[in-house]
Image (cartoon, helix red, strand yellow):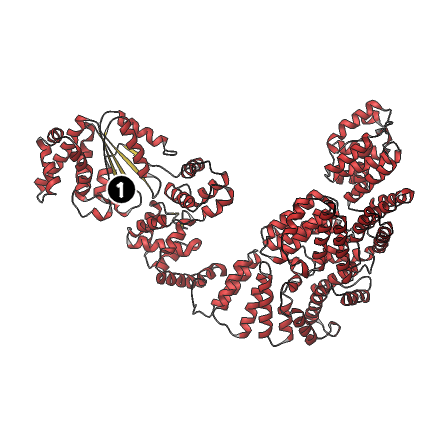
């Protein structure tokens, strides 16, 4: 079935139905479906009971006079009855029969007789039955046949014959005068084009026998431009390889380069003149750098020959544009380039590199050609490759940068130059291959003599990569740090290097209790306002603050201001994930200090758009997920953590470990068993990282407890705590293992152990002082205590959590307090309404349902919205008018936090779920109460 060829077939059908002779020309570039259109016209002829004669000319037969005419006419004569054959070849047509049997005669008179005879033969055949003659690839027909077809074309109007000839545009022979004289008699010209997107979808359906997915069709259409030959070859190859027309297979199918298509393209190109072939190869090698001037210098063709060859390639449908010639599709360019003989290809790339370098083209464009060469001889080649790597690195393409640098290393540079190349390579590799980066830095350090040079190499390493290698990186760091000397005796660049080395050492020693304590002392000696003007000072301060956080050695109200000051000085770049800066994120999340952190991470995301690597994007995503989690926005946290997990993949162990840990932390409060099982079934280097190991142990404990195996769950919780305490990490904000174990003890009836563990966590949380972790610990302690004492503790948890960013924890505390008082108690109802409002704000439908179920148990009517305070009423009216929280805060000269609190109280008191129903609820309130402001607001 022909696709998107209705207009062409309608024109052909009209010519067949006219009952008089016509010559129809079918033309177009390579692959647009000229032969398929001849098939369609042939089918029309059959439907109208026309006799059909068809031939396809071939290049190798051009030397046989009347070869195409014989193939066209002899089958009809052979298959005809004796009487019909005699009737057709009588009179002038007898000369045609002689020529078909004996060949093209030598004399001019005899040749003219044959031309008249062949035309008479066709006329006789047409009198018996309308005749449809189809000649494909006319440009390859022999000259005797072309002379006859021109003779026939001059007389077609009086004959019951429709002649359809197909000619490929751009073919050198298509411009032959004999061919032009034939097609000059055309009465209709059909020029089919490439298929539109829906036509490509139809062709895919034909190949696969089912409807193809939109993404699959779009990918294949983009790769082939809808050219029927290209597209059909790709689809056929995809089907033969077992690919299906689904989104998952779209990229693989679009990247196919079918061997039959390659052969056909190269055969067509080989049939062209030498200048056309040379120019096609030069355009393929130069790619986006192709200009007329460079093409002339690369091929040696003068301007006139070059432009003529370019016009031929354009007419063939292979290239587009004269000023900046390009292949119509990458598929075509790759096929042509692969078809260039290896020796010629190498020579072309070498000349292209030299020409581009001489004309000052960007290093990456020159380096693309150097990558093909086995041994560049130019002294500038290595520096160009390094410059190209820097350019690729800046635009967020570290793998491309690494390729350039590896190529430069193959040339065997001297040790000093090799060391620098290794350092640059490691800098690129840390974004996608951290193990290799560590190895290459270690190799570079061995080639460098001066401590300063070795230090410069070592500080390129991401601190998180040290644990991912068996190489003695810490020993190397200490050795170089000792050689440099203590930072207090240094100044300038050497002091910076010493600070950055120390930062990496302290980062890697956080799990060691003695080193942890030493880091805390180092921080204390810096005073309440440590210097953080330089990169080295900030890199060192991050692990020192982390040590104070993990060890619970300083309260949150002292750690958070320093961490926020550091963040103010730190550029918001995605590359911060390769430094110690992620430890600042951890400290601020633990301290429940999220406002500046969230804004800083948003700036990181904005500045990195289009330039960050997958690794950087995934790690920043985990940081954002942690902020969402600490804010109580569980759905958002899960979405971000899953995106980071999928983006990082399992190949990059470092990213996979961090994203797995973050996703596990999200799955613990959400109780997502499917997600928990998926994480626990995976593998990572969890045993090497005490925190990751403890988080996964907590997840195992939760899964076991949910299944009813409390003893196993308790064992996992206690194991997590033991692992953290072995490191000296005593801050419950990191992981509330003690309260989790306390609640299991409580359910098992071990009241004493439960009270001991929950009291321990509360005590440590009070030392830390962050409202989020303290409120969480108090809530768990209240469950263990029970009775009036537990209610008092729970009320304290609610009061503390009112000042926390974690609205999920506040929601749970309010819900439990409301359940303790009961919905008939005003205090209980108020707490339940508050819990529902917080649950709505945090998008926690299960907690919304739970609060509503408890409220529905009330036996007395609850308070009405008339309890709104004047301030709450004013904020509600402004919100209902459409103002944002920020605009309301500016109008009333209060903080955004105060606006949020007033609105939350309004939602709770009015029993509504959010701003979208606020206006209607206020009007309903005015109708049912005598609120003093009703008249004014109406």
The quadrant of the picture occupied by the C terminus is: top right
x and y percent of residue 598 in the render? 72, 49
Q: Is residue 855 left or right of residue 396?
A: right
Q: Residue furthest top?
A: 927
Q: Residue at x 31, y 39 (%)?
A: 35
- Per the image, the residue denoted by label 1 is 137
Which of the 4 image quadrants contains residue 238?
top left
Placement of 903 over or under 744, stated as above or below = above
Which of the 4 image quadrants contains residue 342?
bottom left
Q: Is residue 349 left or right of residue 797?
A: left
Q: Residue at x 38, y 44 (%)?
A: 233
Q: Is residue 180 left or right of residue 653?
A: left
Residue 246 in sight from this viewpoint:
yes
Say what secondary structure mark 1 lies in.
Answer: loop
Residue 384 in sight from this viewpoint:
no
Foreground of the two, 665 or 908: 665
Foreground of the two, 889 or 616: 616
């Amino acid at each position: 079935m022909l696709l998107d060829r209705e207009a062409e077939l309608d024109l052909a059908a009209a010519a067949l139905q006219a009952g008089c002779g016509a010559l129809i020309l079918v033309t177009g570039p390579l692959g647009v479906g000229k032969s398929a259109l001849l098939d369609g016209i042939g089918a029309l002829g059959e439907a109208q009971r026309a006799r059909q004669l068809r031939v396809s000319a071939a290049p190798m037969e051009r030397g046989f006079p009347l070869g195409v005419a014989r193939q066209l006419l002899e089958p009809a004569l052979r298959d005809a009855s004796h009487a019909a054959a005699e009737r057709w070849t009588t009179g002038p047509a007898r000369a045609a029969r002689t020529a078909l049997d004996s060949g093209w005669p030598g004399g001019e008179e005899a040749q003219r007789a044959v031309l008249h005879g062949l035309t008479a033969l066709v006329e006789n055949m047409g009198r018996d039955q309308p005749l449809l003659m189809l000649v494909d690839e006319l440009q390859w027909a022999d000259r005797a046949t072309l002379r006859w077809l021109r003779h026939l074309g001059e007389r077609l109007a009086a004959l019951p014959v429709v002649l359809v000839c197909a000619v490929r545009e751009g073919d050198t022979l298509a411009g032959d005068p004999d061919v032009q004289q034939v097609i000059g008699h055309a009465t209709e010209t059909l020029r089919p084009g490439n298929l539109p997107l829906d036509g490509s979808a139809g062709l895919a359906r034909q190949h696969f026998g089912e409807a193809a997915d939109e993404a699959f069709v779009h990918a294949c259409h983009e790769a082939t431009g809808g050219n029927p030959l290209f597209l059909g070859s790709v689809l056929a190859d995809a089907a033969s390889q077992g690919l299906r027309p689904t989104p998952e297979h779209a990229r693989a199918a679009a990247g196919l380069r079918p061997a039959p298509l390659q052969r056909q393209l190269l055969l067509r190109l080989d049939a062209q003149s030498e200048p056309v072939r040379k120019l096609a190869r030069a355009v393929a090698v130069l790619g986006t750098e192709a200009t007329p001037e460079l093409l002339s210098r690369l091929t040696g063709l003068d301007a006139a020959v070059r432009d003529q060859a370019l016009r031929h390639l354009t007419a063939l449908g292979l290239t587009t544009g004269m000023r900046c010639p390009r292949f119509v599709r990458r598929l075509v360019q790759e096929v042509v380039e692969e078809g260039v003989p290896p020796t010629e290809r190498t020579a072309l790339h070498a000349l292209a590199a030299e020409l581009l370098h001489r004309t000052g083209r960007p290093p990456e464009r020159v380096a693309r050609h150097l990558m093909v060469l086995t041994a560049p001889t130019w002294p500038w080649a290595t520096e160009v490759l390094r410059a190209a790597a820097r350019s690729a690195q800046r635009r967020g393409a570290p793998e491309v940068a690494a390729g350039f640098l590896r190529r430069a290393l193959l040339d065997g540079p001297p040790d000093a130059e090799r060391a620098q190349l290794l350092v640059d390579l490691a800098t690129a590799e840390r974004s996608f291959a951290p193990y290799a980066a560590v190895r290459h830095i270690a190799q570079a350090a061995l080639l460098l003599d001066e401590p300063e040079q070795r230090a410069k190499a070592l500080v390129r390493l991401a601190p998180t990569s040290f644990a991912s290698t068996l190489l003695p990186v810490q020993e190397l760091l200490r050795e170089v740090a000792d050689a440099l000397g203590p930072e207090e005796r240094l100044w300038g660049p050497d002091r910076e290097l010493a600070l950055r080395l120390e930062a990496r050492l302290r980062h890697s020693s956080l799990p060691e209790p003695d080193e942890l304590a030493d880091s805390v002392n180092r921080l204390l000696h810096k005073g309440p306002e440590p210097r953080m003007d330089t990169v080295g000072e900030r890199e060192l301060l991050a692990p020192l603050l982390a040590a104070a956080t993990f060890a619970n050695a300083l309260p949150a109200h002292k750690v958070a201001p320093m961490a926020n000051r550091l963040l103010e000085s730190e550029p918001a770049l995605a590359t911060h994930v390769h430094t110690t800066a992620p430890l600042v994120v951890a400290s601020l999340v633990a301290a429940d200090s999220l406002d500046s952190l969230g804004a800083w991470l948003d700036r990181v995301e904005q500045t990195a758009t289009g330039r960050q690597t997958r690794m950087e994007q995934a790690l920043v995503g985990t940081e954002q997920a942690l902020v969402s989690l600490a804010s109580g926005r569980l759905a958002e946290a899960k979405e971000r953590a899953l995106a980071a997990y999928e983006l990082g993949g399992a190949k990059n162990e470092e990213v996979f470990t961090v994203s797995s840990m973050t996703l596990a932390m999200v799955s613990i409060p959400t109780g997502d068993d499917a997600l928990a099982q998926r994480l626990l079934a995976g593998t990572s280097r969890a045993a090497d990282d005490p925190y990751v190991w403890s988080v996964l142990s907590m997840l195992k404990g939760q899964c076991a407890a949910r299944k009813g195996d409390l003893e196993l769950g308790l064992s996992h919780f206690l194991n997590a705590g033991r692992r953290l305490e072995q490191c000296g990490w005593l801050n419950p904000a990191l992981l509330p293992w003690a309260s989790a174990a306390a609640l299991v003890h409580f359910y098992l009836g071990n009241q004493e152990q439960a009270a001991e563990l929950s009291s321990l966590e509360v005590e440590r949380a009070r030392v830390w002082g962050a409202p989020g972790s303290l409120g969480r610990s108090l809530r768990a302690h209240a469950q263990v205590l029970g009775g009036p004492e537990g209610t008092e503790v729970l009320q304290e948890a609610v009061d503390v959590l009112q000042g926390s960013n974690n609205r999920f924890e506040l929601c749970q505390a309010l819900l439990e307090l409301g359940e303790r008082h009961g919905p008939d108690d005003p205090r209980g109802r108020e707490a339940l309404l508050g819990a529902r409002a917080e649950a709505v704000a945090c998008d926690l439908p299960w907690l919304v349902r739970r609060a509503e179920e408890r409220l529905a148990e009330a036996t007395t009517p609850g308070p009405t919205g008339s309890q709104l305070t004047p301030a709450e009423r004013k904020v509600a009216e402004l919100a209902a008018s459409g103002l944002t929280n920020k605009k309301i805060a500016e109008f009333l000269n209060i903080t955004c936090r105060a606006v949020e609190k007033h609105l939350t109280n309004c939602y709770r008191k009015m029993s509504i779920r959010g701003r979208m129903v606020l206006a209607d609820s206020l009007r309903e309130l005015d109708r049912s109460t005598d609120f003093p402001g009703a008249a004014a607001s109406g």
